[in-house]
Amino acid sequence: MPINSFENYPMSWKPSIDKTKKPIYQALAGQLEQDILNGVLLPGTKLPPQRELADYLDLNLSTISKAFKVCELKGLLSATVGSGTFISYDALSNAYLLEDTKPKHLIEMGATLPDNASFEPLLLQLKSMLQETDYEKWFGYGRAGERLWQKDAAVKLIRRGGFETTVDHILFANGGQNAIAATLASLCQPGDRIGVDEHTYPGLKTVAAMLRVQIVPIKSENDQMSPTAFEYACKNDNIKGIYLIPDYHNPTASFMSVENRKMIAAIAKKYNQFIIEDASYHLLGEKPLPAVASFAPEQVIYIASLSKALAPGLRLAYVAVPSQFKEPISKALYNLNISVSPLLAELTARTIVSNQFEVLIQSHREQAIRRNQIVNRYLADYTCLGAETGIFRWLLLPGKITGAEFERVAAQHGVQVYAAERFVVGNSSPERAVRVSVCAPETLGELEQGLRILQRLLNDHT
């Protein structure tokens, strides 16, 4: 029997479960999940203390703890030391941003796509490769030991992004998302915790949920991860590492200062934390800042992909891996992929070492600047964060409309943008903002059409 009477006692959640269903902790976890999905428990709601809930349900404390842990590993709950357990703000949001089919009748301003300036040069390079007498080798298995010159190309690309490394640290992955998945799979066990920004890349969230790795939001200061908060998490939140996007942070478009990079690196060294540095956007700037990996090369897994700098269809990423992590990550990549496509690996390497590479990067940069100038013209009356060379912007919303509400309204009027709720982590409160992709519309005319619609909607909510 419960120790206390709960007849008139205020509790944010008073579940009713069938105790004949075994195991009880799974039944309780299922009820909690359904109450979240059905809107009985809203994002941000603080759940009763576990002891209180155990008393209310007349169950062992361990049963409550196990039920909470099941939901926490699914990303539905966020527990903070000293603060309690909350329904995650992103519990109901869809973090899978790339839909099965391109949305019909919508102007695409959600997905972070580069413009198509590099497509024709890549096609010409590909045609040249396929006309070679031994072209059939591009359709076999790629073997790591046969890629030395391609690793030289990887080193050149990574150097261009602000980090000096050597060929003995290079691994190949089928894109940045693949590299993130392999890194988490090899360095983390189910239930392990890693720190991330309060708003982060949704692909990191989905792969962490699949692997049952918990992500812990680390507070920001001046729009970048706070070193003080990172150190606090090292001491108190039992994290194993962190995930960062230092340049053109996705989704907030912010940059981490060099000073912050140094402090984050120093803390990682002090507490033996690994850092996953996502360098997807490092090549967008003319003079990239030094990578975090520059200050802690033995702690940082540096992931340089080509999807944002050249073309999304180049499913290839170069991963510069510290010696201590190379074997487990290499095995994880093998288990996930066997190998990367020799065709794409060769095409990418040839493009990098050719004189075309800098021309293509510059072409993308000029296109981004041109498009951002148009964005500035239409959204001049609103706070739209981001650099002129970026391929997306972070639009802060006027009035009281939330990002999720604005995303729905924009879609109803023919424009796809993505709300802050898709990017927020745990019990962090989502900004009232949406991410607007600048280069996804196929033409400048389509971009202007989308911006006119967004401008009108923003005016309506001012």
Image (cartoon, grey):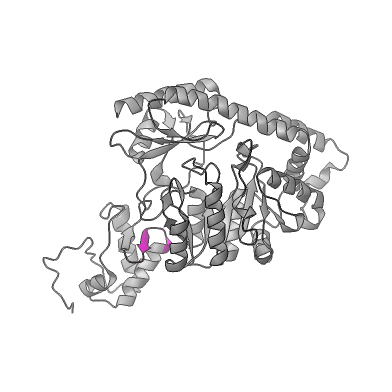
In the displayed structure, does residue 275 sit left or right of residue 347?
left
In the displayed structure, does residue 120 sit left or right of residue 11?
right
Q: Residue at x 17, y 78 (%)?
A: 3
Q: Residue farthest to the left? A: 8
Pick the front one: 181 or 436: 436
Q: Quadrant of residue 59?
A: bottom left
Pick the front one: 377 or 164: 164
Q: Quadrant of residue 106?
A: top left
- Residue 4 is situated, as x and y percent measured from the top left of the image, at 15, 75
Would residue 290 be counted in the magenta stretch?
no
Q: How many marks?
A: 0
Placement of the C terminus among the 4 image quadrants:
top left
- Residue 120 is situated, as x and y percent measured from the top left of the image, at 70, 29
Q: Is residue 163 visible?
A: yes
Q: Residue at x 69, y 64 (%)?
A: 323
Q: Quadrant of residue 82?
A: bottom left
Placement of the N terminus among the 4 image quadrants:
bottom left
Q: Residue at x 57, y 56 (%)?
A: 276
Q: Is residue 118 visible?
A: no
Q: Residue farthest to the top? A: 445
- Residue 435 is situated, as x and y percent measured from the top left of the image, at 45, 38
Pick the front one: 341 or 355: 355
In the displayed structure, does residue 253 sit left or right of residue 50?
right
Would residue 76 be counted in the magenta stretch?
yes
Q: Is residue 275 above or below residue 449?
A: below
Q: Residue farthest to the right? A: 133
- Residue 447 is situated, as x and y percent measured from the top left of the image, at 50, 25
What's drawn in magenta, residue-wise?
73-81
Q: Residue at x 66, y 53 (%)?
A: 319
